[in-house]
Amino acid sequence: MPRPTPRLTLRVDDLRVEVYVNRAEMGCAAAHDALAILEAAQYAGIAPRAIFAAAPSQNELLAGLATGGHVHWPAVNAFHMDEYLGLPPDAPQSFGCFLREHLFGRLPFGSVAYLNGQTPDAAAECARYGALLAAAPIDLVCAGIGENGHMAFNDPPVADFADRQSVKVVQLDAVCRQQQVNDGAFATLADVPTHAMTLTMPALLAARRIVCVVPGPTKAAAVQAALSGPISTDCPASALRQHPNAVLYLDRASAAQVL
């Protein structure tokens, strides 16, 4: 499928914003661009390292990536950006399981590094994963934005733009936990874990390129805060406006408050 053309393009500080008529076109365009980033890295002699978000909002992007494009996938090293603590290893809500189903299990990646949410020592697991991330630059982050403006599990109460850690344990705030119910991942709020491991904001923002996909009406307020409010941990995604190579992909519903 050809790359769809955005209905509107704008720039907010350093951030490029593209608005599409629907989430299918939005996801398709983002996938085209993410594949092109990986292809360009390989053309430059780099074995790309990429971080992927796990959420229903990413479905169209992940489906587009799973077509493979012209990427030599055995040279691509993959990471995921957050994981609940304490879920059973085969729980469908596990972000590792989600990405294995939608992407990691569908392409022959050179390596996939998983956060171990069943670890008895979460601090040691964060240190282990942080060392893997630090081994070489990250070429691409494929991200989303939460209803409270979070990226990964950097909710406003715990987000830190100057965090010294690259991976840390966090307590999830109420809005974030309710979003997991809204997304259909859990039946009730009580079922949602209270803690998780997440890549921190500096770890995400250190990537050379960021593709951020945000569909749907439930994200409209967060998008408005990210683009129009102050750059602040009150809306962690606002930090995208300071990244030199980030693109925010919206559909008409998520862009409703900024059009």
Image (spheres, rainbow, N blue to C red):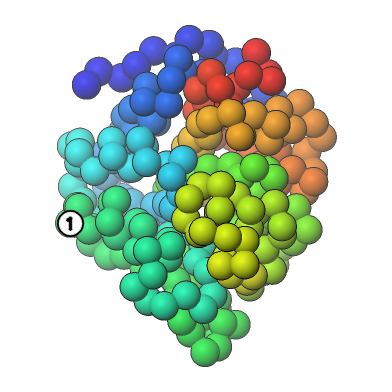
Residue occupied by mark 1: 108
Q: Is residue 188 left or right of residue 56?
A: right
For label 1, the crowd category at 10 Å Cα-Cα, with few meaning under 14, some 14 to 19 and many 20 or more, is some
Above-or-below relation of 163 to 53: below
Which element carries disc 1, helix, strand or loop?
A: loop
Residue 184 showing in the rendered view: yes
Asked if residue 106 is positioned above or below residue 97 in the image, the reply reads: above
Which residue is at a point 43% across and 20% down the rendered structure image? 22
User: Where does the image place residue 233, in percent across and percent down from the top left?
Assistant: 77, 48
| Residue 124: % across, % down | 55, 85
In the displayed orientation, state which residue is furthest to the bottom.
120
- The image shows residue 124, relative to residue 138, as above or below, that is below
Residue nearer the viewer, 122 or 194: 194
Residue at the image point whose x is 54% and y is 14% from the top: 9
Residue found at the very far front of the displayed protein: 187
Question: The residue under label 1 is which amino acid type?
Answer: Pro
Which corner quadrant of the image does residue 248 belong to?
Answer: top right
Q: Nearer the viewer, residue 141 or 120?
A: 120
Image location of residue 59, percent across then percent down: 37, 41
